[in-house]
Image (cartoon, rainbow, N blue to C red):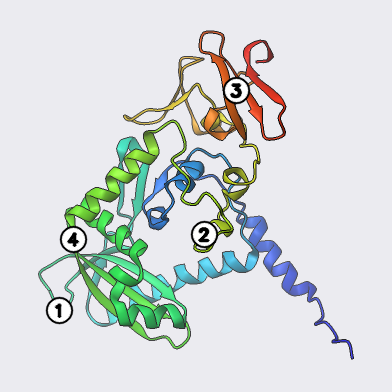
Amino acid sequence: MVAIPPPNHATLEAIYKDYEQNNPPKDRPYLGASQMGHECDRALWYAFRWVHPPEEQTGRKIRLFETGHREEERLINDLARAQVTVVGRQTDFSALGGHFKGHLDGIVQGLHEAPATEHVLECKTHNDKSFRDLLKNGVVKSKPGHNVQMQLYMHYTGLTRALYMAVNKNDDTIHLERVHYDKAAAEAAVKRADRILFTDRPPSKLHEDPNAPGSFICGWCPAKPVCHEGEWGRRNCRTCISATVDPEGGWECEYWHKGLTIEDQREGCPKHVYNPGVVPGEQVDGDEEGRWISYTLRDGTTFVDGGDDV
């Protein structure tokens, strides 16, 4: 007997659709501390350079993010019930010319275990499997990306302790863990961010074959079509050879000799010439003065970018 498929619920579809319409995907104009848990430099470079479209989220996924934000408020209220104060809810850090930023969940004062020491606060939710691994191995080993976030927050606030506050979404168990500042780890993360932000070519691929064993990270990466499948990068200022990241802040166009607003960067201009690092082909020739570059594409055809065509 053929199984009867479950009915489509128009009401549920409408709920998810509303989340999607009111939360359109957006390009992030900076590299965020929360992104530094991603192990692939190339993926972070692509995202910062707006090479691929921002990842679209389903209504269900957007709602899940909202649940995480609501749980953060609840956890902070739980601390207040224990007479522990959370301040600095709007504390941000901005570094490397404003191209590298992070937002703290807050700063904890009066923690019972160390009442005289202020702590960076990081709140996270976990499913049951992730939570059990956290209890077994601790946040530094179990969630290295979360640890990097806290290290960066401590580094830029000058604090030496962080409070990791996690909740199991399955049974509401709360886990608290104090984390010490690791100067070497924080400085390594800052150097990595600097390297990603200010290089004009994409870093090496984390995996040459996205289908090889151990390359599963490539399977769900939004950069995969560009990185591995020969898809063209988008046309905007950040993918143009004339745009440079100013270490003092902002972006500059060497062709028009002007600073670029975020709106300028999104719109681009008719004089766009691709950064060779985002063209799906091999560069064979070029002329800096004439502002053109030629490539042999994957199918063997020749593509000339720039020159009289610009």
N-terminal label among 1 and 2: 1
CA distance separating discs 2 and 3: 34 Å
From the top left corner, tell me how far across and down residue 299 is, in percent.
Answer: 72, 34
Residue kind at label 4, given as amino acid type: Tyr
Q: CA distance from mark 4 to mark 3?
A: 44 Å
Q: Is residue 157 visible?
A: no
Which of label 4 and label 2 is nearer to you? Answer: 2
Q: Marks 1 and 4, Cα distance to the nearest angstrom?
A: 17 Å
The first of marks 1 and 3 along the sequence is 1
Tell me the number on the disc at residue 113: 1
Whole-Å distance between the Cαs marked 1 and 3? 57 Å
Element carrying mark 1: loop
- Crowding at dot 1, Cα within 10 Å, few <14 / some 14-19 / many 20+, comes out as few
- Circle 4 is placed at which residue position? 181
Whether residues under marks 2 and 3 lie with C-beta atoms below 8 angstroms apart, the answer is: no
Nearer to us in this view, 7 or 307: 307
Q: Give the quarter of the figure containing the N terminus.
A: bottom right
Residue 160, numbered circle:
none
On the image, which quarter does residue 245 sit in? top left
Residue on which the image places disc 2: 215
Decide: few, some or many residues near mark 4? Use Cα within 10 Å; few <14, some 14-19, many ≥20: many
Where disc 3 sits, the SS reads loop
Q: Which residue is mark 3?
A: 272
**Neighbour tally class for label 2: few under 14, some 14-19, many 20 plus, Cα within 10 Å:** few
Residue drawn at 55 percent across, 59 percent down: 212
Mark 3, other Cα within 10 Å: few <14 / some 14–19 / many ≥20: many
67 up-or-down from 145: above or below? below
Mark 2 or 3: in front is: 2
Residue 9 coordinates in the image, percent (x, y): 78, 76
